[in-house]
Structures are given as C-alpha cells and as structure tokens.
Amino acid sequence: MERRSARRPLVIAENEPPVAQTAPFSLAVIITCWNYAEFVGPAIDSVLSQNVPNCELVVVDDGSIDDSWNVILSKGVRAYRIENSGQRRACAFALEKTSSPFILFLDADDELCPHSIETLISKLDNSIAKIQYPLVKIDSAGNRIGDAFPKLGDWRGREKIKEQILCSGVYTTPPTSGNVFRRDLCSLVEDADYDTAVDGIILFAAPFYGDIISISKPLGLYRVHDRNDSGFNTAIDKDKINRGLNRYVQRIDHLNIILKTMGERNSVEVISNLFILQQRIYLNVISGKRNRFHNIISIIKHLFLHDHNRIKSFWLSSFFLLLYALPPKQSKSLLTYRYNGL
C-alpha cells in the first residue's frame, strides 16, 4: 500500500496555553469533537480532574457548527479548530501535536473514570503495543444504564490474539475510548485512507507490534445516545452491514500488507473467516432468508477451534442455532436485541 500525500487539515483557530511540564509525558489523551458541544466538556473534565503531570491533553474541534469550539476554549486546554476532515484525519493531526510514547483516543462523548490515567501509566513499558479495558454504558445525562463491556480478563500477551486474528479475523476488543496504543502503532492511520475511524487498522495490527495488556476493571464511560457512530442504540439494516463488511475487507487487506512487510509468513483469510460468515448470516436474517445449516456449523467450528473462551463459544453457538431455528420475524428480533447490546 503506497503512502498517499494527503493534504493536512486547514487550521482555523488554535489555543496553546503555556504548559508547565514537570516530567516527561508518558501518555497523551487526544479528544476529537464534531458537533458534541453537550458532551465534550465532561470528556475534557474527566481528564483534567485527574491532574496527572505526565499526561498531555490535546483537543481538536473537527469543523463543528455547534458551540463545541466555545466549550473547548472555556476549558483552557491546548486545542485546535480545523476544517471538517473526519475522525481519522483529525486524530492524525492531533497526533503530530503530541510527544508522548502512548496515545489514548477519547471520543468526545465518552469519559474517563477517576484515577484511570494513573492506572494506565503504571502499566506502560516499551514492549506494550496496546492496553484495553472495559467501558461502562451511560446515557445522555451521564446515568449508568448497563454493565461494563466487553467482558475482559486480566492478562498480558500477544500470541493467542495473533492466532485469533489470523484464524478468525476478529478478537474481543473495546470501542475506541477503551484502548491505549503505542505511538508507532498509531502511525499506521496515515495509510488508512479507506477508513474514517481512527482505530480500525491499529486494533488489528496491535498484537503483531507488541504485547496487549487486558484489564478487567472498567476505566471509562461509554455514552449511548441517538447520535452514536456505533451499533448501539441504532437500527440494524443491510446497508450498514454491507458498509461494515467493505470496511472490514479493506482493513484486513491493509493488515496483510503490513504483515508481509514485517516478515510474517501467515495472512488473514478474507473470504471465509468468522467475521465474514457472521455478517453473511446477519444479512440473510435481515432479508428474511433462511440460512443454510452448514453455514451455522461452520461458525460453530470456528468458535470452538479458535476462541479460547469456551463459555463465550457456547453462548455464541447457541445464539446462531437460535437464529437458524426461529421463524424469520423472531430471528430478526433476536439479532436486533444482540446487535444493540441489550
């Protein structure tokens, strides 16, 4: 994949207050905001209130047309207002404004829990590519509305995750705000011109760059509202699944190019891996078509051969068997229920 010389976003305004740095930065928190005036203030406060000297904060207003920029300025943080460029390019711009070896991309509608930054910094070392942790779901007003997700254990490693990606094309990982990435891994977003999200390729590439640390304790809050850019609280439809499939294939193609340059002998199978099989089954359910039983069996085999969590494999297998056995209307209701994380 050739590097493209994409034009840098035009800076419309900036605020760079002097920083009294007392220690080398260990972690940078980057917040990019597009029309989230009602949420970006609490997101910034959740970082500032922790008062950690070796954590830097950069906020980018990605061409908002609401009051976001004024809210950001009122916080007195280092901030930039750029022409609307999308999350990936806005984050790449912010990345250039930081110096920390590790990066946390905090969505403007999410928040960090108290003391989370200290916890994360205490676990950092040069052999880590990613730290992941669950997020607690909250509503627009900040009220807790569900359990922490995803369910994660406490462990450190890379080989099992590499195996899952190579064999299944997926692994359990939190949304954007539930991850910390090493800087060199973040540089991959520069070549991801096919993507609008910042964390697509770097989530897949992480275990090939270093260890992943998984933390079971929730360290952030994930806000569910009517403008979420995720599956939560939104209707499931064919167009959305097809867009996700196309984006996924591009990410895997990108990953395979990266693996080849790293000397990795294996690559991810795109045609019939677990994610592709799942999405095809979902498309059939939404269209009212009956799935073939051998496709259900293929998914179950994938789950038990390549997912090391047997309990999870059992429940997912039961879910796909129910999708097959139920009448079309009930099958679609079950899929919608799971899709929205209810």
Image: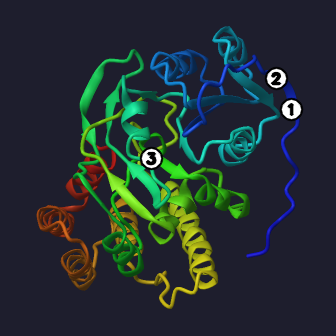
Q: Are marks 1 and 3 in contact (CB under 8 Å)?
A: no
For the residues marked 1 and 2, what is the alpha-carbon distance in whole angstroms? 7 Å
Q: Earlier in the sequence, mark 1 or mark 3?
A: 1
Q: Residue at x 32, y 42 (%)?
A: 134
The quadrant of the image that shows the C terminus is top left
Which residue is nearer to you in this view: 248 or 176?
176
Q: Secondary structure at mark 1?
A: strand
Q: Are marks 1 and 2 in contact (CB under 8 Å)?
A: yes
Which residue is nearer to you in this view: 259 or 321?
259
Q: Residues within 10 Å of mark 3 (few under 14, many from 20)?
A: many
For the residues marked 1 and 3, what is the alpha-carbon distance in whole angstroms? 27 Å
Q: Is residue 221 visible?
A: no
Q: Kindly identify which residue carries mark 2.
A: 14
Q: Which mark is residue 321?
A: none
Q: Position of residue 77 (x, y in %)?
A: 67, 18
Q: Position of residue 215 (x, y in %)?
A: 29, 47
Q: Kindly identify which residue carries mark 1.
A: 11
- 221 w.r.t. 126: above or below: above
Position of 234 with respect to 24 (left or right) is left
Q: Kindly identify which residue carries mark 3.
A: 179
Among the 4 quarters of the image, the one containing residue 184 = bottom right
